Image (cartoon, grey):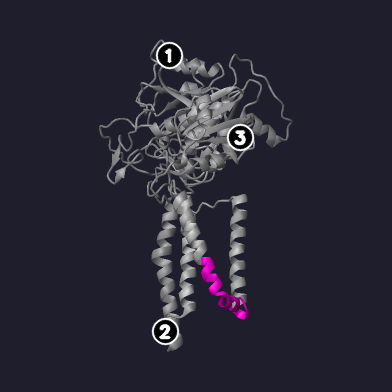
Amino acid sequence: MDNSFRYGLLLIAGLLLLAGAAFASALIVNSSLLAIVLLLSGTALTGVSSWQLREELALLVRGQRGELVLMTLGLLALLAGIAWVAALFPSRIDMTANREHSLAPQTIHMLKSIDKPVHITFFHDRGMRETVELYEQIAAQNDKISIEFFDPMLNPSQAKMRGVEFSGTALMESDGRKLTVNGPTETDIANGILRVTQGKQQLACFVEGHGEPDPFSLESHDHTEGNAGHSHGLEQKVVVHENHGMAKARGALETLNYVVEKISLASKSADLDRCSLVIVIGPTLPYMPHEIKAIETYLDTGHNGLFLLDPFTDVGLDPILAKYGIVMDKGMVIDEASHFWADVSAPAVTDYNRHEVTSKLPLTFFPGVRALMPAAKPVPGVRIRPLVNSSNKSFTSNDRSRAGFVQGVSKPGPLTMVLAASFNANTVDSATLVMKELRGEKIKNESVATDRKPSRIIVAGDSDFATNSFFHILGNGALFLNSVNYLAMRENLIGLEPRTYDLPVVNMTNTQMKATFIMSLILVPLLMAALGVAVWWRRR
């Protein structure tokens, strides 16, 4: 065997032994003896073989071979430099379809709105790298958020001093308030930051006792079934099931630091004054006079309310809405131009009136919705702002079994399906305001003699969009949460929605479905056929 080949093998073996020494020192516990043996053996073999191959190695670095070696070493040095710079200035790119490893835009918006210092101490172990990265992302959004990390096994004194016994515990402090968070998810951490910065939780009261959806129920697709599946619009077939659940909406509110309670107005012990706002969703049975009076008094004393009232139901709340200049149509809205999938009684909306509630709101749809209108005589001190309207080709139908326009009975679109109304004794009503603007008159505040305090309400002609069946689809959940935050005077949280992970589903309006059908089954085949004919004609 040639000596050069033999010593070449020894050089490779020496280098492998040196690499083995490095791995043994890094990966094997109590490996000092093994690492020393491998290091000495590798050094000896590398030194001896390099001395015997000194002439061959000298030839290797000369001429073109030398340039190749230098280029290789230079490339390795460049890669090492890039790795060093990346370690000093780390950056990350989330290439997942749903950006599962990045903060949600709503969470970023909430974090940037924090104006109080927050200090977070997170105790973790080596298996919690993803949670550590999540905390690092959160701290990077606002310089008022500071964070430090400890391993309770390596820093037992820090853990004992703070009363921490387990890894995964985060201690949050802000303005003298302290909070412990044990959840590792983005919603858990965001909720903790909200709670420690705001100092108190607001109480959202869901009225019960009239067939309303249960905020603590996970039921969905349960109270009406159509021939082709779930239906809330035309040709409903009533089936005996539990009422719709609203646990998704309730969970989202709790994530935003609300406390959710059910309240029965029929009980004499019901205390609405504890509530930050009252939520009336989808009642099917009439309210008693003293219950209506309780809600009316609650609003008159300066509180706010959310009313989601379905079509073809009369529950006796018209007097309350009339004090805000709102009249509800008895039938439902039919929109043949823009509706969800093939259901013309489920209007779909992508373009909204400008308002805090509808800012950056994606598509929403309303499975069976009634129209809302301002009263013929404006109410002094009340301003009404339509939020969500149907298309110009929509109309109302008082027949729940078919979607036909009846001349003289049906009202043509666009129709208001969601609106916000506010009362303030020191303002003029919206209709008077518009007329004065059109006439070019000077607008000034006008006081109204009343004992009512300023209040807000939002009214929607449908409750199904906020139930478990449809809350998570497109912008429905965001519309509900934005409405609650607006009424609770927490506009800084508008747009913040808990992260959900649902199976990917393509939801389209009827216009999008028609465009997809025409494109895939007509235009593309015709284009291919035309190209084929053109090629045949040219070769002919």
Of marks 2 and 3, which one's residue comes earlier in the chain? 3
Mark 3, residue position: 145
Q: Secondary structure at mark 1?
A: loop
Give the x, y percent position of residue 482: 52, 34
Mark 1, residue position: 270
Of marks 2 and 1, which one's residue comes earlier in the chain? 1
- Amino acid on which the number 1 mark rests in the picture: Ala
Which portion, as a residue range, is magenta? Answer: 46-64
Label of residue 149 in the image: none
Please report contact status of discs 2 and 3: CB closer than 8 Å, yes or no: no
- Amino acid on which the number 3 mark rests in the picture: Ile
**Between marks 2 and 1, how big is the CA–CA gap?**
82 Å
Q: Label 1: how many residues lie within 10 Å, few (<14), some (14-19) or many (20+)?
A: few
For the residue pair 18 and 383, the one nearer the viewer reads as 18
Residue 475 in view, yes or no: no
Please report contact status of discs 2 and 1: CB closer than 8 Å, yes or no: no
Q: Is residue 55 magenta?
A: yes
Give the x, y percent position of residue 465: 42, 37
Mark 2, residue position: 536
